[in-house]
Image (cartoon, helix red, strand yellow):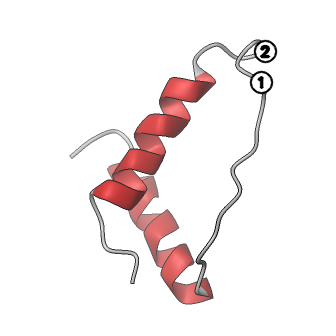
Amino acid sequence: MTPYSKVAGTIQEWIGRNGIKDMNVAGPRASKDPEIYGAVTDLLNEVFLCGDTT
């Protein structure tokens, strides 16, 4: 279990309920928040690589 496991599960449920097939992810630039890229990458890896979104 990772720090993102609970929220990743919530996102997986939301994707499934809403039939999401394509997703655009936007947020602050890395120059404004240097840690954002790693945090988002870790979260999305948990969402898409560790769980079933169907």
Q: Three-letter amino acid code at disc 1? A: Arg
Instruction: Identify the element where label 1 is drawn.
Output: loop
In this view, 3 is above or below 20: above
Quarter location, residue 24: bottom right
Q: Residue at x 31, y 56 (%)?
A: 49
Q: Which residue is mark 2?
A: 32
Residue 22 screen position, x and y as percent: 63, 70
Q: Three-letter amino acid code at disc 2? A: Lys
Q: Residue at x 54, y 37 (%)?
A: 40
Badge 1 local density, few (<14 within 10 Å), some, or many (20+)?
few
Residue 32 screen position, x and y as percent: 78, 15
Left or right: residue 47 versus residue 16 is left
In this view, 22 is above or below 33: below
Q: Do residues under tags 2 and 1 come within 8 Å of each other at their CB atoms?
A: yes
Front position in the image: 17 or 31: 31
Which quarter of the image is occupied by the C terminus?
bottom left
Residue 9 screen position, x and y as percent: 39, 64
Quarter location, residue 52: bottom left
| Label at residue 20 | none
Number of numbered discs visible in the structure rendering:
2
Farthest residue toward the left?
1
Residue 6 screen position, x and y as percent: 37, 56
Left or right: residue 1 versus residue 46 is left
Q: Residue at x 55, y 87 (%)?
A: 17
Q: Which residue is mark 1?
A: 29
Badge 2 local density, few (<14 within 10 Å), some, or many (20+)?
few
Q: Residue at x 76, y 12 (%)?
A: 31
